[in-house]
Image (cartoon, rainbow, N blue to C red):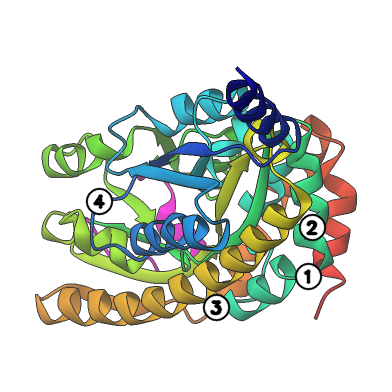
Amino acid sequence: MRKTLIASTAIASLIFSGSALSAWTGWNIHNKDYPITDALESFIKNAEKVTDGRVSGTLYNGAVLGSQGDAIQMMQIGSVDFAGFNLGPMGTAIPEVNVLSLPFIFKDVDHMHRVMDGAFGEHLSEAMSKHGIISLGWYDAGARSFYNHVKPIVNPSDVEGMKFRVMNNELYVSMIESLKGNATPMAFNEVYQSLKTGVVDGAENNWPSYESTNHYEVAKFYSNSQHLIIPECLCVSTKAWGALSEADQAALKKEATKSVAMQRELWKKREAESRLLVIDSGVQFNEVADKAAFSEAMKPVYAQAIEAIPELEPFIKEIQSID
């Protein structure tokens, strides 16, 4: 009886100290052998080591647990514990992250890293926490550019009248409409067939996505506009995070930093490989020399975003103040 009482007391002590064993469920839209997938798998594997098994988990790849919208809702209620989320579609659930979906908000990818790795990234994560999600780090997703099966995009006027697939966020609709194009929100897995059949003329994405989905087979004009630079996040539910001790939280933050560094290196390599592969396949690539013309044409998107979400204005000013 005394041994049973001691054991029960020890278990209760673990639970109430925030040190109980936690089996985390992880969501990921990407498949195996993709930079974010490798980084997430490394994170959760190392999390188990540095917490002496108090945190472990399983990562479910390829969106087998549902769409990102589903996964965000599951994270907010605590049934998904960690994930690699694209911050574009997240804007429909967490309005503050829409600041990252503004065209040309970042000068280049290096500028995005400086902004997100500093105080601004912490401020944004704090805003996200009010919606049940925090970010432990910001993964690289490169720059998004236009591709289509009609013609090269050189000037803003080239988009006029064309039908472009966009992610499901009103900001992207406004972005295409500012160029007098026609925006079609569409699930990512529908884009290949829609390009092939002419439902849409084009889409916009980064090099690895353009290559890995075989979109380059049915949209052979790639125009390097780099109009969007949207990071992805290593996100954790506030419910799972709040259950951890301060020591375990500190350990996982260190592992998240390592995971981000790993992912960015893998991304840089994969991006170069994808670009070379599609250009060697016969894709007609053109550099958009006058990006300022596109930036100027898209300026109305900022005013529309601030009108719809006033909280974005201080975030925009903070980003623009960082060199």
The answer to whether residue 277 is left or right of residue 12 is left
Q: Which residues are magenta?
A: 149-163
Which residue lies under the disc numbered 4? 31
Residue plotted at (73% across, 37% down):
242
Residue 69 in the image: x percent, y percent? 48, 28
Which residue lies under the disc numbered 2? 122
Say what amino acid the circle numbered 3 marks: Asp
Of circles 1 and 3, the one toward us is: 1
Q: Quadrant of the N terminus?
A: top right
Residue plotted at (65% across, 62% down):
251
**284 drawn magenta:** no
Task: Look at the numbered discs 1 and 2 and tell me whether their residues touch, using CB distance below 8 Å.
Answer: yes
Q: CA distance from mark 1 to mark 2?
A: 7 Å
Secondary structure found at label 1:
loop
Any part of residue 28 in sight:
no
Which residue lies under the disc numbered 1? 118
